[in-house]
Amino acid sequence: MFRDMTPIIKQLKIFVIGSLVLFAITAGAIIYWVTQQAFNAKRITDAQVEVYKAQAEQVGKPQVIEQRYYSPQDKEVKGASAMAGNVLSLVNAKRKEKGLSALVWNQKIANGASLRAKKISSNAQWSHDGLSQALWNAGLRNWYSENLAKGFKNDPTQIVNAWVNSPTHAEKMFDERCTQAGIGSYGEITVLWMGVCGQPR
């Protein structure tokens, strides 16, 4: 007698169908996981690209230093330290409001101003006495004016605002003849020298 194979065939069919369904589900899950990983990777890559773009766009643009905008690439302040650059940038902003040209950073003037700041601090001197000799010692033969500041926590904004609010300091800062400047600081002393015209000899 032949055994009835129908139940076995049915079970086999169920097994095969179940296996195919399970395979399909597993394959679908794997495909979904791979797709998600690829999508996430692309999303991360896109985000990185945006960061790189943003960083690239910032090259040469003003940088935030002590909560102020100062760009080392600006020709007016090129070569200045962060502190001096901020002071000069703020001075130039005030001059611009008056319709005046910007003062251009001059390292030779700044070197003399730095020595002047150190001497004033060391001698506990607080006046413009000795300016002519200081300028001569620095090798500066053109006419230069001087603004001094002491304290203000070396904050550029407070320093420049103090000069603007002082008639005598503002008069020198807004002298339309001035074209160059140098700034020196030592301790709490800040010295701004401004030149009339031409290169210092």
Image (spheres, rainbow, N blue to C red):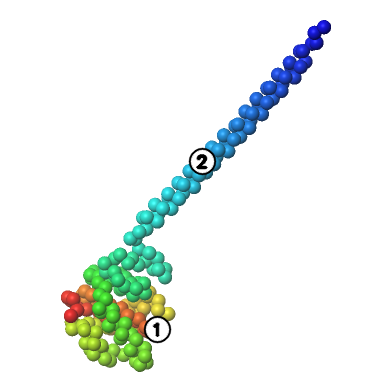
Query: Would residue 105 appear left or right of 24 to someone viewing this image?
Result: left
Which residue sits at x=33%, y=85%?
Answer: 117
SS class of the residue under badge 2?
A: helix
As drawn, 121 above or below 93: below
- Which quadrant of the figure contains the C terminus? bottom left
Which residue sits at x=55%, y=38%?
Answer: 34
For the residue carrying disc 2, how many other residues have a C-alpha within 10 Å: few (<14), some (14-19), or many (20+)? few
Q: Nearer the viewer, residue 162 or 185?
A: 185
Say what amino acid the circle numbered 1 marks.
Gly
The residue that mark 1 highlights is 187
Residue 22 occupies which quadrant of the picture? top right
Q: Residue furthest front?
A: 1
Cβ atoms under marks 2 and 1 closer than 8 Å:
no
- Discs 2/1, front: 2
The residue that mark 2 highlights is 39
Looking at the image, can residue 118 be seen?
yes
As drawn, 118 above or below 37: below
Q: Nearer the viewer, residue 85 or 29?
A: 29
Which residue sits at x=40%, y=83%?
Answer: 187
Query: Which percent across, then down, holds residue 176?
Result: 21, 75
Residue 15 occupies which quadrant of the picture? top right
